[in-house]
Image (cartoon, rainbow, N blue to C red):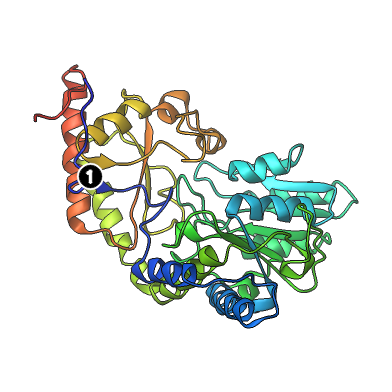
């Protein structure tokens, strides 16, 4: 028998997959949809759409301290990552072992930089890898991991890369809006962004490219986006992206306060289950992300049981067509098979509350107690 969850009462703690759309973004999308015209048309209708696109471009650029002309709109973070790795013209690609699948697959055959047990890139290994080959490389390392929240030493990665003439791409999809992101301070050449991670609509993202970096398109057609990404702009999505970027930029300092909620969540879980492992706890992390184990219970079982209890979380990345698969991120962190198989991710968002954390801890604790008692996963009472 199926048991439907009351969505009005359910608690959503899967914001790293997709966060709640911000009201300002929804309003911007609706306003854009009321416009008629193509941003490439020179008549008044087209110019009105173009203004909406360029206003959003300025907002997205400001979120990462870039120039508006550096922003190339894409269909999302996955396309942005593909454009960076396949359009930069570097045959040799070096990526971290914990990158998003879109980087790992776009850079098929790339050399993998190892990480330590906390999930942090080994800078000495990167130095050796770049020194061992004369061909200038493209190095791609994310700013923050989507599964664990671990923040990478990107400025240090850039310092190593520059000694060997390497370009640096940074997937900042998870980091933007959660911690400060400044392309100039990081020193990177390219940054990937995605609207639905910061409270904008799904299906729109951007690759921000320093003016000095040549970039060849991977989709061909007209001359949109200064010839770097062809196809009529998704101007309603772009408008929503811009509004979300403005709100996310204003809310970065407030987002840091989620760290108190996340830390309280972890303290309470460890009090119930001291044997639980919290991945990346010894490294700098995003303030909203907790990847933790329930020893002896499979991740998929936990996700389903918590969903029945009205709490939405995930097991690893949400980019695998709904499948729960072994995490390459946790494997790279030397997690043993049992730990990796029992890990889930709880991720808070801009509208999360202390009550959401209470609901998660209560549901997790009840599930843990049943597991300890050897009982199965039961549906909640009607």
- Picture coordinates of residue 187 (x, y %)? 68, 70
Q: Residues within 10 Å of mark 1 (few under 14, many from 20)?
A: few
Residue nearest the viewer, comparing 315 with 227: 227
Q: How many marks?
A: 1
> What residue appears at the point 49 percent right and 28 percent down from the top-left corner?
325
Foreground: 14 or 331?
Answer: 14
Q: Position of residue 204 (x, y in %)?
A: 55, 58
Q: Quadrant of the C terminus?
A: top left
- Residue 373 visible: yes
Residue 151 location, x and y as percent?
51, 56
- Displayed quadrant of residue 4: top left
Q: Is residue 382 left or right of 189 when viewed as pictured? A: left
Towards the viewer: 134 or 37: 37
| Extreme residue in the left direction | 382
Answer yes or no: is residue 272 visible. Answer: no
* Residue 71, percent from left and from top: 65, 70
């Amino acid at each position: 028998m199926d048991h439907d969850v009351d969505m009005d009462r359910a608690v959503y703690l899967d914001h790293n997959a997709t966060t709640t759309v911000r009201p300002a973004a929804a309003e911007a999308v609706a306003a854009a949809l009321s416009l008629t015209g193509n941003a490439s048309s020179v008549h008044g209708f087209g110019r009105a759409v173009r203004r909406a696109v360029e206003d959003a471009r300025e907002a997205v650029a400001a979120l990462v301290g870039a120039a508006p002309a550096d922003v190339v709109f894409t269909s999302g973070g996955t396309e942005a990552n593909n454009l960076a790795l396949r359009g930069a013209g570097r045959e040799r690609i070096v990526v971290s072992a914990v990158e998003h699948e879109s980087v790992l697959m776009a850079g098929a055959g790339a050399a993998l930089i190892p990480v330590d047990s906390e999930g942090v890139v080994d800078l000495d290994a990167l130095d050796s890898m770049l020194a061992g080959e004369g061909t200038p490389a493209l190095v791609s390392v994310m700013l923050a991991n989507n599964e664990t929240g671990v923040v990478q030493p990107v400025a240090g990665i850039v310092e190593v890369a520059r000694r060997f003439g390497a370009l640096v791409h940074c997937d900042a999809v998870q980091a933007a809006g959660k911690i400060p992101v400044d392309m100039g301070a990081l020193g990177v050449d390219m940054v990937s962004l995605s609207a639905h991670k910061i409270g904008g609509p799904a299906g729109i993202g951007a690759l921000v490219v320093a003016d000095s970096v040549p970039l060849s398109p991977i989709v061909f057609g007209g001359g949109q986006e200064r010839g770097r990404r062809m196809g009529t702009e998704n101007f309603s999505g772009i408008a929503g992206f811009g509004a979300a970027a403005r709100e996310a930029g204003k809310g970065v300092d407030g987002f840091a306060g989620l760290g108190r909620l996340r830390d309280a969540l972890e303290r309470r879980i460890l009090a119930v289950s001291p044997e639980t492992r919290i991945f990346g706890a010894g490294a700098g992390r995003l303030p909203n992300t907790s990847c933790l184990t329930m020893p002896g219970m499979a991740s998929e079982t936990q996700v389903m049981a918590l969903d029945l209890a009205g709490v939405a979380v995930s097991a690893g990345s949400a980019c695998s067509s709904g499948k729960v698969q072994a995490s390459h991120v946790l494997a790279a962190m030397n997690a043993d098979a049992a730990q990796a198989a029992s890990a889930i991710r709880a991720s808070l968002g801009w509208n999360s509350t202390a009550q959401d954390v209470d609901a998660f801890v209560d549901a997790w604790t009840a599930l843990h107690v049943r597991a300890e008692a050897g009982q199965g996963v039961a549906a909640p009472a009607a």
